[in-house]
Image (tube, rainbow, N blue to C red):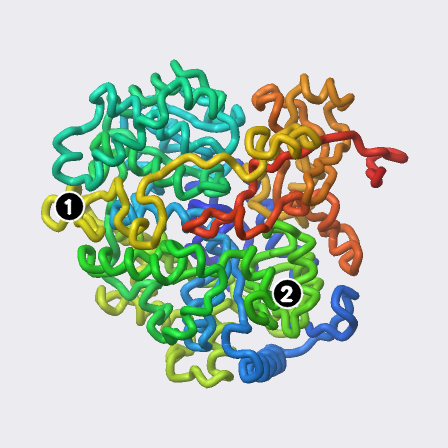
Amino acid sequence: MAKEIKHTICFRCKPRCRLELEVEDNQIIKVSTSSIKKCPRKWASDLERFYHPDRLNYPLKRVGEKGENKWQQITWDEALGEIAAKLQVLKDKYGAETLGVTAGTSRTYEELNSRFLNLFGSPNQCGQAQICHGNSAVVATTLYGWWPYWMHIEKLLNTRCIMLIGRNPPHSHQTIWEGIEKAKKNGAKLIVIDPRRSESAESADLWLQLRPGTDCALLLGMINVIIEQNLYDKEFVSKWCHGFDELAQRAKEYPLDKVAEITWVPADQIQAAARMFATQTPSCAMEGMGVAHQPNSYGAIAARHIISAIVGNVDVQGGEELLGPAPFITEHEIELPDALPAEQREKILGKQFKLYSWPGYDLVQSSVERVWGKRCDMFGYTCMAPAPSLYKAIAYSDPYPVRALITLSSNPMVTIPNTKLVHKALKSLDLYVVVDYFMTPSAQLADYVLPAAMWQERDFLWNFHNTTPVIVAGEAAVAPTIPGKHDRRTDFDFWRGLGVRLGQAEYWPWETLEEYYDYRLAPMDLTFKKLLEMGTLAPEKWEYKKYEKMGFGTPTGKIELYSTVMEKLGYDPLPYYQEPPESAIRTPDLAAKYPLILITGGRFHPFFHSEHRQIETLRKRYPWATMQLHPDTAKELGLADGDWAWIETQHGRVMQKVQLFEGIDARVVHGQHGWWYPEMPGEEPWLHGVWVSNINVCISSEEDECDEALGSWPLRTFQCKVYKVKTYGEGHPVAG
């Protein structure tokens, strides 16, 4: 067979680059790097991952006790038939809400998860969106009526000031960093707000090194400076912003001296940043997971959008661009949210977090649809049950029994807080199904483990969850099923196969993924193959200031600095600062025992969250989990660079290697996330080393510590202590 070039979409990390793969005899020979020269990941290692000997190849059924790592190979028909039958029994006994579904960070076709669940009758989908861009999208859509688009370089070439808040694009979004570098060469200013001196901070014109978890106070202080010094866009605010007077009163509560005391950032730096952002316009802000992972994430994200609004940066070239939807059948429409009965909606776990649940969803999206004609899909795949609520319900049947769980391309034993609770929950399930690429600590506790197709084996239609009119198509480079070698499937095949067996056949009319995509593209008179030839479909010219013709997609038709949605839901309509649940100020006795502030979640190459730990090439570069500690703190604790040390909180402890780092405050420690060790035994109690360095062992999952409106759970601002691990021999850490 002749060599072929296949045009795929890479899912290795976030940007979704379109790549060329050279294929011969259904084997990937080469990855073109023409479009990814800036990407620091080693592409040879990606083929190493794809052809890794430990990849899952056939469906497996547990034959021993949970956690014994004893399996029997079965067929897909057998697996889907048995799973469907068990789901039906559990549904009949407990109700449809007894099923939960978890997914990773856009690794799959999430709209199909929702479609299946809505037809099944369960409201309990759980994913990473609530601690990722989902919560940002919810807040932005609540205030602006659409989510600003920041994922393209062209925008950055037209901006004069960029403010990164808890975001480090060199490690999290390389294409964005390429755009920022070009913008800086064009004279744009860069402000970085981060507790650590990241690569972005190194390049910044202003780096504000704040106390973790105080972003909301800092931004409100900047807003106060802008208002008091008359740096805001008076015409735009008077015509297109609702609640400015109320905002001004709230901002007065955050004078510079008070904010400096809260945040540890000197008053003159706060003022300089505010003036720079307000005068070097158009400017834009980009918040990252450092904001999403805070206890008060709503307040910080709302303040970030408000500061852009009052200086007139919204829907202008180089600012917070509201591009609108594409005219095809969206993910929201595919989800069939109306198929979920009203009485089942009421049973969603974590319904007390009203903005990210059905009450907020209906209030926000009805206004969005009125103005834009379609809903903003990035709201989080209809609505989501927060992880702390889901695993509590599984472990303790509170508020009702959740007895079945399906996990796709996610690894909750590593990625969800309070690993001890997650372990208890997964062990207690009547039915646990995992669809993944490798055997993970979570998969070791499953009843069925099914082999998933990687991005090289799947067609994909990517549209940034319909927040933009840009559509990208990628094709499978090789077949996921090769007789005699492996039988992997996409999640389209999984959900359709399960749905058909559970009486949903009429709602799954497409037999192939290509048919499904043809259906979604039909309103544009396109087919998936035609779009593949085009590669990317985007407007020839962007339109700005669309609000002058149609208003904003909010209840008032304006940007809601004072949120009428939040007010109707019973929350404070304006952002306000909350001291973290654990801090020297709020819990001084706890801080006396655990004097350091633990933060986590920072991205680092060459891994993506909990992925790629099997790859020998990458592990040689990064063999162990690492914590960052200031040299003065390390010296005081008797620790040297490379020492194994415990990170301990009141919730648990793990060990990581010390990295001396002057770019962190002496009162703060950064622990890496996503760590497990596939080379360690899979059976209990090892579970591939999930208890060794996994920082989620140290993190709480109390619902009352989640954001009150969004339900997002904090992954930072925990009080901790650090101390040396006793060792024997070279490189063998043991508890001491």
- Marks 1 and 2, Cα distance to the nearest angstrom? 50 Å
Q: Residues within 10 Å of mark 2 (few under 14, many from 20)?
A: some
Q: Does residue 33 appear to the left or right of 93 in the view shown?
A: left
Residue at mark 2: 396
Q: Does residue 410 appear to the left or right of 174 in the view shown?
A: right
Q: Nearer the viewer, mark 1 or mark 2?
A: 2
Q: Nearer the viewer, residue 422 or 285?
A: 422
Helix, strand or loop status at disc 1: loop
Residue at mark 1: 546
Q: Quadrant of residue 527?
A: bottom left
Residue 157 appears anywhere in the view: no
Q: Which mark is residue 702?
A: none
Residue 174 sits above or below residue 56 on the image: above
* Image position, residue 223 (x, y; %): 30, 28
* Image position, residue 240 (x, y; %): 16, 40
Counting every numbered tag in the picture gives 2
Helix, strand or loop status at disc 2: helix
Q: Residues within 10 Å of mark 1 (few under 14, many from 20)?
A: some
The residue drawn where x is 78% and y is 51% is 680
Residue type marked 2 = Tyr
* Image position, residue 66 (x, y; %): 74, 68
Residue type marked 1 = Lys
Q: Does residue 572 appear to the left or right of 417 in the view shown?
A: left
Q: Nearer the viewer, residue 430 or 202?
A: 430
Query: What residue occupies the far left of the structure in this picture?
Result: 549
